[in-house]
Image (cartoon, helix red, strand yellow):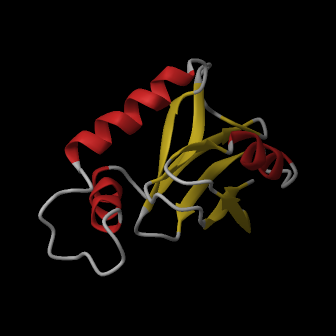
Amino acid sequence: MKQAVHNLEITTRGQGLYEFTSSISQWTSGQQVQTGLLTVFCRHTSASLLIQENADPTVRLDLKAYFDRIAPEDGAYEHDSEGPDDMPAHLKTALTQVQLSIPVVKGALVLGTWQGVYLFEHRVHPHRREIVLHLVGE
């Protein structure tokens, strides 16, 4: 059994979905693991991870608009010391996930035809987000 760990940094330009499927696919294929499991972990509480359609960009626009409706910036939140976008960002993260598990078969990620892996940035301003990749397999 082999294990490998890698830190990946994603720079965002503000709220939205940022696909990084190719980065994790390239790293995974370079590890020479034929069968295994890749864990993708986001080390933040105001950004999250999604596996989502990567063919039609309007899907990403609709996702962002939906989450803005259910966690608006003008809500009556107790936690507001980091700005009006902070608590909504925490709520959006709580409703999504910070960890994904993706099977690896024949050295490649097992994703569907239209699936991509995204960082979902919930804050208004640009950030540097750290993603940890952990691959276990043989």
Vertical side of 67 occupied by 49: above or below: below
Q: Position of residue 10 (x, y in %)?
A: 68, 59
Residue at image position (22%, 76%) is: 79
- In depth, the one of 95 and 16 nearer the eye is 16
The quadrant where residue 109 appears: top right
- In depth, the one of 125 and 93 nearer the eye is 125
- Give the total number of marks visible in the rendering: 0
Q: Is residue 9 left or right of residue 78?
A: right
Residue at image position (52%, 71%) is: 43
Q: Position of residue 88 (x, y in %)?
A: 28, 59
Q: Is residue 109 left or right of residue 107?
A: left
Quarter of the image where the N terminus is located: bottom right
Residue at image position (14%, 75%) is: 78
Q: Is residue 42 left or right of residue 45?
A: right
For this orientation, the residue located farthest to the left is 76
Vertical side of 91 occupied by 86: above or below: below
- In depth, the one of 67 and 33 nearer the eye is 67
Q: Position of residue 54 (x, y in %)?
A: 59, 26
Q: Position of residue 114 (x, y in %)?
A: 59, 21
The quadrant where residue 67 appears: top left
Residue at image position (57%, 57%) is: 39
The quadrant where residue 7 appears: bottom right
